[in-house]
Amino acid sequence: MSLFKTEGVVKRFGGLLATDNVSLTVEKGEIHALIGPNGAGKSTLVNLISGLIPADQGRTVLDGKDITGMPSHLRVRAGMARCFQVTNIFRQDTVLNNLMLAVQAHSGTSFRFLSRRSNELLLQEHAEQLAAKLDLTQHLHRIAGTLPHGVQRKLDVALALASRPKLLLLDEPMAGMGPEDSLQMVGIIRELRKETTILLIEHDMDAVFQLADRISVLVYGRILTSGTADEIRNHPQVQEVYLGTEDDAVEAMV
């Protein structure tokens, strides 16, 4: 059984059909990439999936539970987390405090009956574990807003992981990164797949082809095709509408 799926999702903005009967399936444990040219409707679809905007039609299911109509905070409780294109961190606070706040926000009643000191120690322990996963340990006591862009992106991913999601939406995690930071993020995402399923929205095609088990191509609000990296590389319509001319496509996908 698939972990996540949308069925016939439609969104209109006035006369504009932004998503046109989109059906998308993400299998448990996979990295599934969503790609498409600018204006294809990717941002709208991700906002629909994460519950930031309501769909006009269609159904959304996460781990067997119908979450259609749920706002974003309830989708987080159901097991979905999202990293945005723009980092969503507390810029004036330390990395450690950012992480402790995130852990506390998703702890529910876990620490309710502990003493204040025990509570703080457990929160810090969990925060440090998240930092280690994202290679942030050396930055724990730095102010988040002073960190380089690539490190801030890693912090944003760590904050999303605090909810222990079943499905992690990574919305252009490599945006604005140089080659070295992008390479580090690719390695991190590879490790994250061991504990959560990932829906990756990304323009960096080299990263997509390295990471994705399956890729879905969105064009004019519709899924053009889904398949493995090799299938998408060699799909003539993908080469034409997304990757440009065939020569450009071959060069981009080497």
Image (spheres, helix red, strand yellow):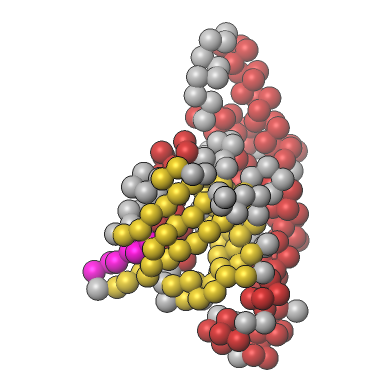
Query: Can residue 175 be spotted in the picture?
Result: no
Q: Residue at x 61, y 11 (%)?
A: 117
Indicate whether residue 244 is drawn in magenta: no
Q: Position of residue 110 (x, y in %)?
A: 55, 19
**Image-quadrant location for residue 116:** top right
Numbered circles on residues, count: 0
Q: Measuring 64% from the left and 20% from the top, which residue is drawn there?
A: 122
Is residue 158 visible to us here? yes
Residue located 68% across and 62% down the image: 213
Q: Which residues are magenta?
A: 9-14
Q: Main secondary structure of the magenta part?
A: strand
Judging depth in this view, the residue of 68 and 240 nearest the camera is: 68
Q: x, y percentage for residue 32? A: 61, 60
Viewer-side residue, 28 vs 121: 28
Q: Quadrant of residue 119?
A: top right
Residue 164 locus on image (x, y percent): 59, 37
Task: State left or right for residue 50 relative to residue 144.
Answer: left
Q: Is residue 11 magenta?
A: yes
Name the quadrant of the C terminus. Answer: bottom right
Q: Residue at x 56, y 62 (%)?
A: 201
Splitting the image into 4 quarters, where does residue 47 fall? bottom left
Residue at far left of view: 14
